[in-house]
Image (cartoon, coloured by chain):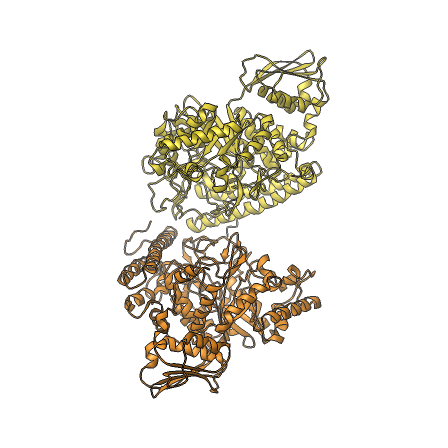
Chain colours: A orange, B yellow
Amino acid sequence: MSIDKLAAAHSAWLPPRALQAIKARRVAVHGAGRLVETVREEVGTTVTEDAELILRLSSERLGDEGFALYRRDGVTVVLADAPAGLLYGFFHVVRLGEAAFAGEWPVERHVPAMRRRMLDHWDNIDVHPVMGQVERGYSGGSIFWRDGVPRDLDRVRVYARLLAATGINAVAINNVNVHATEARLLTDRLGEVVAVAEVFRPYGIRVHLSVSFAAPVMLGGLPTADPLDEGVRGWWAQTTQRVYAAIPDFGGYVVKADSEGQPGPFGYGRSHADGANVLADALAPFGGVVHWRAFVYNHRQDWRDRSTDRARAAYDHFAPLDGKFRDNAILQVKHGPIDFQTREPVSPVIAAMPATSVAVELQVTQEYTGQQRHAVYLGPMWSEILGFRLTSEADVAGLARELVAVSNVGDDPFWTGHPLAQANLYAFGRLAWDPTLDPLSILDEWVDLALGPDVDRAALHAILDDSWRTYESYTAPLGVGFMVRPGHHYGPDVDGYEYTPWGTYHFADREGVGVDRTRATGTGFTGQYPQPWSDVYESLERCPDELLLFFHHVPYEHVLHSGSTVIQHIYDTHFAGAERAVEMRRLWERLAGQVDPELDARVRERLDEQVRSAAEWRDQINTYFHRKSGEPDAKGRQIY
Amino acid sequence: MSIDKLAAAHSAWLPPRALQAIKARRVAVHGAGRLVETVREEVGTTVTEDAELILRLSSERLGDEGFALYRRDGVTVVLADAPAGLLYGFFHVVRLGEAAFAGEWPVERHVPAMRRRMLDHWDNIDVHPVMGQVERGYSGGSIFWRDGVPRDLDRVRVYARLLAATGINAVAINNVNVHATEARLLTDRLGEVVAVAEVFRPYGIRVHLSVSFAAPVMLGGLPTADPLDEGVRGWWAQTTQRVYAAIPDFGGYVVKADSEGQPGPFGYGRSHADGANVLADALAPFGGVVHWRAFVYNHRQDWRDRSTDRARAAYDHFAPLDGKFRDNAILQVKHGPIDFQTREPVSPVIAAMPATSVAVELQVTQEYTGQQRHAVYLGPMWSEILGFRLTSEADVAGLARELVAVSNVGDDPFWTGHPLAQANLYAFGRLAWDPTLDPLSILDEWVDLALGPDVDRAALHAILDDSWRTYESYTAPLGVGFMVRPGHHYGPDVDGYEYTPWGTYHFADREGVGVDRTRATGTGFTGQYPQPWSDVYESLERCPDELLLFFHHVPYEHVLHSGSTVIQHIYDTHFAGAERAVEMRRLWERLAGQVDPELDARVRERLDEQVRSAAEWRDQINTYFHRKSGEPDAKGRQIY
């Protein structure tokens, strides 16, 4: 990327202004190590005496990444056991801004809740004929590759710095659907990974690689990829050794196996534990890990067969394998049982494998939540998921060892297509560090840093605080999911997936709608939950409204806890949601003149599209259910 | 293409066997001219005395292409005014085979009903990211180009010969959606057209080119493509002159303008007559013609707007322009008002423009009729269309000056993907020559020539005779159309186009289904027809069952002329149709050992897919309407 274009890229949450308070102070940085150097570079000139901010290594039992800070006698002090902690402490001071230099306060200790806070890029090297340069990417091209060749990495450097400021410490750089060219990153294109790793390294971020389970065949010329075959084990060991010779701090592998056409251990009659362990064994000598995705289901289901339930698949496949995975094999589980829908229950797999390291996977890229054309702040959704008390002992954040998310970043000048979608990337990093943070406070942080302290924050809150629920209100109702256009997944198509092999159905007929996943009369999925959730979801009376159609097939006249019937709820929420989109656009007008004109123009263009699209959702959903149920809208509004 | 692959290509309806009867005779060919030479090459050795077959030029007032033949005193004589007639006469003798040399018969005269019998290829030079090498092609790649470069034309030579044997005399070689690379065939890539024209020339086939209306801007660097601009007129004149300098018998241009995103005269506030005439004027000095497609409609329609009717569009746009087109501007009208659906009424435009040369366009490539995976013999459909008495004076064949069709040919070894789809290509040529031919007799001709006289013809008739109606029976019911998967158009998706901008709706709700196109209460489309059709289609009582839902929205309980209700008709036809597909597969078994094993394998594979797909259509359509209507199947069969 040229310097011109770099200059044109939005500075996100690290504009020069964000470092103003520090740059105005006398700062001392003590200690050695690459990440300490990074802090020195950030600070610029440092001093040895009379510092107003001191950052130094110490022994505080904060672990590799924690830091402590306090302010006493007009001096702010950041302490860390290790260089990475010092870097995170530095960015904490950046977030505090002038507040870091006011008053006095006792020692605060900050230690990350998750040992690994990771972003997965679904970037391709070659432009994929269907999925493009970035699969499910809505922010332009890849920052790593363009049309088959690596890009200048200047922008990756800026990205690494932005990520470090949120607390991210791991990045997988290529698509989990590993095509032929991308598979070669593991072998003869390893040099490209080396180059990227060098750019991430000064920011404490380790690079991971998505690999094909069939690599021994595709790349090694072996006759099999059977994980119990000695030749295969040897190939993975040797290949991994070569990777670490080039990248000593390489993070490890990410694998999507036996899923949506990707090869996997089932092809050899082996279990997924067998599959994951062969990679884990190859990585173990070097401290690497394999992220093994639990997203395994039958994507060639017959829609006529109501006994098969995609929601059950991950648990059915993986729960019996608990205890069989190596310590450095991380089972990466999507937060819900289906696929990143706007509303899903939490995946029961997260509670089902106490003897396995589980990573919970979120989706920052808005595949099913408006594709960065709709302003949807996902912080509240993730916060709700992470705080969900899945077992009597622990919430999801407590059960998970790691948090992973699919990145929403591309070569777009605003990084994320919709400028307001930056807040999602920022919030993911912050919640991965501390899942108990208030998502609306995180939003404040982002607004302050990215848009400055003088913008109309109340307007931004009014736009974004409820935006996830607004999006939910005008799309698929009551947790039923999908109803999106097949393929690209944007915009409404109520029956789009209804008669397909993908296992995503709503079963709407003249009488009612929803998927019966009860033990009593349905697929039995509710039985995968620990108590009380198993009984709560099983019960038509106790099931929360927002998940009703995920667990039950009910008549349109069924009365919700809210007092509304299902059909009237559908009409009401869709009229209200589309109206809210109009209101969001109106609210943005209040920021006119307060933000960069190009950013303003981009947001306006997206809000226009959101208003159009929300009306389209409203009308398609309402018309569909009106045609099917025959029920009039109690308020007599226009249904086409 | 290598000789090996050529040899591997199926010989279609001109295997060596087909010429056996002629080759066994003493043949005399008299006359001069390139096409007479072609006949000589076909015959091989010729004689001057004691001939049993004489082909010679004469003055019989048969026009440029007609021929006469008779048999007297043991000698078969073919006479023609011009070389092309002699060529067609020769292929007539090929079709007759041994019968051409038996008995005695008086003079028969054969003159083509249509002056131009044309195939349009929708081939691209570059592989289009969505539409591929051949748009709506189901027979492999293009025979003209591969991946951006021209192919060896050996196979085109074989193709030209096959077409000449059916009577085709014009071919447009590139896609009517003209992309950037393909636009250049008109200018700096003209050499590729020259090469193709040289291959078609010996078979009496003139080459046409699809061009972009924006060519003066795209290629000429002009600031406008306004058809009334003098610079634009001059550019077209000069460019066309250069084309004719290279290809003296060049056929002319094909234009899709102001349609589905293609540029056109509307962009300059001009009429389609203005647009067509600028090209016609450029072509006129050289005897060329422009085919101007009438396929103009609003493809960004709002589905909520029930007053707009895509079926009306061609008539609304073009009927007022009758008389305004140059003589060498041919208005190319799809046979139905929508888009090559399995069942549509005949387009009223065909009767609405008596002062305009109208070409009727058919679709040999099976975009909406099974994509050459389903065995669907289209001869009966086309025969029905051509024989439809649209006005009190004339049928469609009589109203049309030309017949044009989209080709189904690619580089597939069987030419057409499904080997039985060869019969469609063959039938199109034959019907364009003589629309009164019995399509089942044409099928006999093809079977004799392509599969040989010893195959189980009864089985083939049982498979193919009703195959179009069979396909109709398990797909969209009663003329309502579409219900296909958006984009690729294969397989069922009842609501796939229901809430889209494409203008193709069925309006099914709890009570009924169909599009009200009446004058009384609907879009008024019936008013575009001459009497009696305008009243017939307007009337719920008189409207033919098979078009009922094209013209009327009716309750599911509406009783058809057949005595069945609409809903029971839907169930019955779908069960029967899928069962017929199974029966077709069973019938094919009877041909085992009678045909080439590779052809046999290909047909079996396609029939398997047809059986699967027909069951899928049956179940999706039945389930959809069962869920919506709530009506049980009177026969209690399985509806999912």
Quadrant showing the N terminus of chain B: top right
Q: Which residue is drawn at 50% across and 81% down?
A: A32
The answer to whether residue B564 is left or right of residue B47 is: left
Instruction: Please state the horizontal and vertical placement of residue B554, each as a whole percent of the image.
Output: 38, 41
Name above or below for residue B290 compared with residue A238.
above
The answer to whether residue B439 is left or right of residue B73 is: left
* Residue B192 seen from this side: yes
Q: Residue at x 69, y 61 (%)?
A: A222
Instruction: Please state the horizontal and vertical placement of residue B446, each as a whole percent of the image.
Output: 62, 30
Name above or below for residue A415 compared with residue B82.
below
The answer to whether residue A88 is left or right of residue B615 is: left
Q: Quadrant of residue A370?
A: bottom left
In-front residue for pair A189/A524: A189
In-front residue for pair B360/B568: B360
In-front residue for pair A188/B584: A188
Instruction: Please state the horizontal and vertical placement of residue A285, each as a whole percent of the image.
Output: 63, 76
Name above or below for residue A261 compared with residue A28.
above
In-front residue for pair B112/A195: A195
Instruction: Please state the horizontal and vertical placement of residue A260, each as a whole percent of the image.
Output: 55, 59
* Residue A436 seen from this side: no
Q: Which residue lies furthest to the bottom in this view?
A: A73
Counting labels gives 0
Name above or below for residue B352 compared with residue A530.
above
